[in-house]
Amino acid sequence: MEYDERNVYLVGLMGAGKTTIGKALARRLAYGFVDSDHEIEARTGVSLPTIFEIEGEEGFRRREALVIADLARLGGQVVATGGGVVLRPDNRENLKDSGFVIYLDVPLQTLCERTRHDKGRPLLQVGNPLQKFRELHAQRDPLYRSIANLVISGSRITAQSVVNQMIKEKKVPWKR
């Protein structure tokens, strides 16, 4: 795959802004946009909570891996991934090999505030969501970092700040 045809993948915990930033970034780069969770819902015809309820997290992760493998064969896409995409080694390999990976590292308290009313996040339907974020962060942060070409930290991440940081660090994955 040519360098300018590679995808740009956004990774990070739930509520990091992957979809919002991804849409704006895709417009800025003149790329297509895909949200991998929405793609799973489109393919199955049911919501993520329903998939989790019927198939459990492992069933969902199998479906996610199929979607990621398909998206890795495309080019010129900004892809907002699910927060747990990095849990499977094959997903990490597909992301790293087929694209430019940006880790949106947002403070846990901010993530908790952003997701507190969202009933569509099965992993957060627990008594203490902040503690759940701590657990998820401890497990996933090293995995995100292991595949990231660029880590952007903070609670006020915008598409413009992502692009600016990519340019500043000369980590621009498209032809200029």
Image (cartoon, helix red, strand yellow):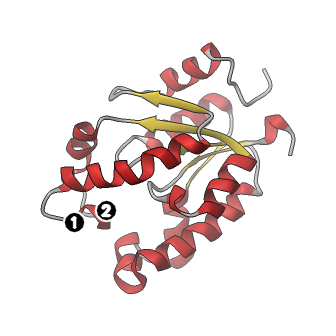
Q: Residue furthest left?
A: 127
Q: Residue under circle 2? A: 121
Nearer-the-camera pick, 90 or 13: 90
Tell me what residue is drawn at x 60 percent, y 68 percent: 65
Q: Position of residue 98 (x, y in %)?
A: 74, 48
Give, as a three-letter code, the residue at label 1. Answer: Gln
Give, as a three-letter code, the residue at label 2. Answer: Arg
> With respect to residue 123, does 107 lie above or below?
above
Q: Position of residue 38 (x, y in %)?
A: 49, 61
Q: CA distance from mark 1 to mark 2?
A: 7 Å
CB under 8 Å between discs 1 and 2: yes
For mark 1, give the secondary structure: loop
For residue 108, which quarter of the picture? Answer: top left
Work out which quarter of the rendered image holds the C terminus and state it.
top right
Q: Residue under circle 1? A: 125
Q: Residue furthest right?
A: 2
Tell me what residue is drawn at x 68 percent, y 58 percent: 71
Q: Is residue 64 visible?
A: yes
Nearer-the-camera pick, 1 or 84: 84
Tell me what residue is drawn at x 20 percent, y 42 percent: 113
For residue 157, which quarter of the picture? Answer: top left
For residue 139, which quarter of the picture? Answer: bottom left
